[in-house]
Amino acid sequence: MNDLKKAQGTEVAFANIVVSEETKEEIKKAKLKAHGIIAKDKDGKLVQILSGHSYDDKAVKAILAKLLAKEQPAEDKVEVIKPSLTYYYIDQ
């Protein structure tokens, strides 16, 4: 995901977050089994999840393409909100 963050970081907000008591509710709401990727549109609406620890590059790129296909806000708006791709992982 780091390579995608470098290439698409201006268009999508990427984050890597350790699974903790504070993040368990977000994982539960997304119906993610334990850890994985949660993709949301600019309004915070769930677009897709990807469960597990390791991911096929094509699957992550497909989610990214789905996020970027969503309508983006106009550049002249005061606040530009990006879609997000967040990877929740278990720190071992």
Image: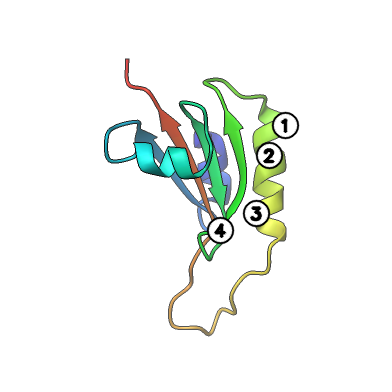
Q: Secondary structure at mark 1?
A: helix
The residue sitting at 67% across, 24% down in the picture is 56
Q: Secondary structure at mark 3?
A: helix
- Decide which of tag 4 and tag 3 comes sooner along the chain: 4
- Dot 1 corresponds to which residue? 58
Mark nearer the viewer, 4 or 3: 4
Are the residues at dot 2 and dot 1 in contact (C-beta closer than 8 Å)?
yes
Q: Secondary structure at mark 4?
A: loop
Are the residues at dot 2 and dot 4 in contact (C-beta closer than 8 Å)?
no
Which amino acid does the dot numbered 3 rest on? Leu
How many angstroms separate mark 3 from mark 1 (CA)?
14 Å
Q: Quadrant of the rendered structure where residue 50 is?
A: top right
> How far across and down, in percent of the image, does residue 24 sit?
36, 36
10 Å neighbourhood of mark 2: few (<14), some, or many (≥20)?
A: few
- Compared with 38, 76 (above or below) is below
How many angstroms separate mark 4 from mark 3 (CA)?
11 Å
- Dot 4 corresponds to which residue? 45
How many angstroms separate mark 4 from mark 1 (CA)?
22 Å
- Compared with 90, 30 (above or below) is below
Q: Residue furthest left?
A: 21
Left or right of residue 4, residue 68 in this image: right
- Dot 3 corresponds to which residue? 67
> How far across and down, in percent of the image, does residue 36 sit?
51, 30
How many angstroms separate mark 2 from mark 4 (CA)?
19 Å
10 Å neighbourhood of mark 4: few (<14), some, or many (≥20)?
A: few
- Decide which of tag 3 and tag 1 comes sooner along the chain: 1
Mark linked to residue 61: 2
